[in-house]
């Protein structure tokens, strides 16, 4: 009998972390692996942000911080939400966490009771359903396809809501599909939520600034549901600060107080140095962010063209984030040298071992028909990766 809890035994390992680990193990054997498995900007953190961290150390910002974050940082978040999103919050409604992942966990664990339902459109970020497991909730999935640009309709949402629904979780721009909901599309969903006041909405907006179509739209802009919306955001993607581990929630005072209480028993406050860097990032303007976004858009267009040329791949043009989520079902049942491809996880492993390109199978994203690949890499690296993918897939028969 295992000494481990049922809770941890039921929890799945992060598929993105698993594939990155396998890629590193292969690279350690001397194989030239191109990793497109991780959702991480390949840019360096801008200099003014790093300088703020150095100054924070010199000024002895090295002590415990308030659990919800320094007031200066939370006020900087309030200003950002007002100036960029026209959303009104008080700094008491902001809770800063050790990454957006912890912010999501805080929200789900504070809102969801055992047995309550959480609606999640598929494909979804791998940790959504796992955090629901930790809360002992029940995930209810709304399936989408590449043909609808992986977006749900108000009718699908209405059909999924029951008296036992507690939370709806989604991201826009979306990981893993890059889909972006327009204001009209969000309003259609908001009108449904208006009819169901028992349902809360978790809006993951971490890819807000990697948006190629228009200004970012938040579902929190609709006043009639705003008090039930929990915005998740942070610095990791926009400012290339993944390793700094900092994110936040914007919600109501009641919810913020609960998140503060939860976090106080798990990690307490986020790193003091990181918080000072976060202030500098939000007060330093978006010049570096816009430069990175332009680079990502150029890379997207390059990869889209090359993916579209691979026979058997079905792909759409994503409007944001830095991922493609192509349908690869045409390769299921095919084989190479006795190796049969049964599903997207098999295909990802084949592409790693035969093509030396790390991707992630779609099953852990709630869509086993597809694979996810990140284009957060240099242009020449992406071109070579697409060449390898085309060659490896061409061997399957």
Image (cartoon, rainbow, N blue to C red):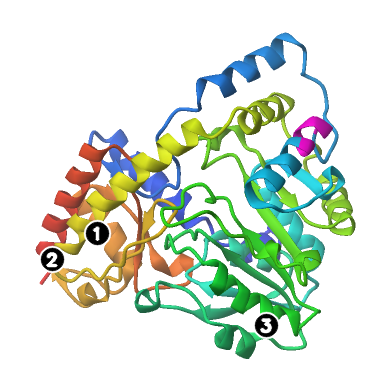
Could you tell me residue 131's position as x and y percent?
66, 62
**Are circles 2 and 3 on residues that touch, CB within 8 Å?**
no
The x, y position of residue 179, in whole percent, is: 44, 64
Q: Identify whether 325 is placed above or below 88.
A: below
- Callout 1 touching callout 2 (CB < 8 Å): yes
Is residue 304 visible to the viewer in this orientation of the structure? Answer: yes
Q: Residues within 10 Å of mark 3 (few under 14, many from 20)?
A: some
Q: Nearer the viewer, residue 113 or 311?
A: 311
Tell which circle, 1 or 3, labels the residue nearer the N-terminal end. 3
Tag 2, which secondary structure?
Answer: strand
Nearer the observer: mark 2 or 3; the answer is 3
Q: Residue at x 47, y 65 (%)?
A: 364
Q: Secondary structure at mark 1?
A: helix
Disc ID at residue 336: 2
Please give the residue where the numbered disc 3 appears in the rendered image.
Answer: 192
Circle 1 sits on which residue? 350
Q: Is residue 309 above or below residue 341?
A: above
Residue 286 lies left or right of residue 19; in this view the side is: right
Residue 101 visible here = no
Mark 2 vs mark 3, CA separation in Å: 48 Å
* Point 59% across, 16% down: residue: 51
Disc 1/disc 2 C-alpha distance (Å): 9 Å
The magenta stretch spans residue 326: no
Report which quarter residue 330 is drawn in: bottom left
Pointer 2 local density, CA inside 10 Å: few below 14, some 14–19, many at least 20: some
């Amino acid at each position: 009998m295992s000494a481990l809890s049922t809770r941890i035994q039921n929890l799945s390992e992060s598929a993105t972390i698993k594939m990155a680990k396998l890629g590193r193990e292969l690279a350690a054997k001397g194989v030239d692996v191109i990793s497109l498995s991780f959702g991480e900007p390949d840019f360096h953190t801008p200099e003014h942000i790093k300088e703020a961290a150095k100054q924070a150390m010199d000024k002895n910002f090295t002590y415990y911080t308030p659990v919800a974050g320094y007031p200066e940082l939370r006020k900087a978040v309030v200003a950002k939400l007002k100036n960029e999103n026209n959303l009104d919050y008080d700094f008491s409604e902001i809770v800063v966490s050790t990454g957006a992942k912890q912010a999501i966990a805080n929200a789900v664990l504070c809102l969801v009771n055992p047995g309550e339902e959480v609606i999640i459109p598929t494909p979804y970020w791998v940790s959504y359903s796992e955090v629901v497991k930790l809360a002992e909730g029940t995930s209810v999935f709304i399936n989408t396809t590449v043909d609808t640009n992986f977006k749900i309709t108000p009718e699908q949402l209405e059909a999924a809501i029951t008296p036992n629904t507690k939370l709806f979780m989604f991201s826009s721009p979306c990981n893993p599909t890059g889909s972006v909901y327009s204001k009209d599309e969000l309003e259609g969903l908001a009108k449904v939520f208006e009819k169901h006041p028992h349902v809360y909405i978790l809006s993951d907006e971490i890819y807000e600034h990697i948006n190629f179509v228009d200004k970012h739209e938040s579902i929190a802009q609709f006043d009639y549901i705003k008090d039930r919306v929990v915005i998740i955001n942070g610095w990791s993607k926009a400012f290339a600060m993944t390793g700094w581990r900092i994110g936040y929630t914007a919600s109501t005072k009641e919810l913020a107080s609960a998140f503060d209480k939860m976090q106080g028993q798990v990690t307490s406050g986020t790193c003091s140095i990181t918080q000072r860097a976060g202030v500098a990032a939000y007060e330093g303007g978006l010049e570096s962010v816009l430069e990175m976004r332009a680079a990502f858009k150029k890379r997207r267009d390059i990869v889209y063209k090359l993916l579209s040329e691979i026979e058997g791949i079905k792909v759409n043009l994503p409007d944001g984030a830095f991922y493609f989520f192509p349908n690869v079902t045409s390769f299921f049942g095919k084989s190479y040298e006795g190796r049969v491809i049964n599903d997207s996880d098999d295909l990802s492993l084949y592409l790693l071992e035969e093509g030396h390109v790390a991707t992630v199978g779609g099953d852990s994203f709630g869509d086993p028909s597809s694979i996810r690949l990140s284009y957060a890499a240099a242009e020449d690296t992406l071109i070579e990766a697409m060449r390898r993918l085309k060659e490896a897939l061409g061997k399957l028969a």
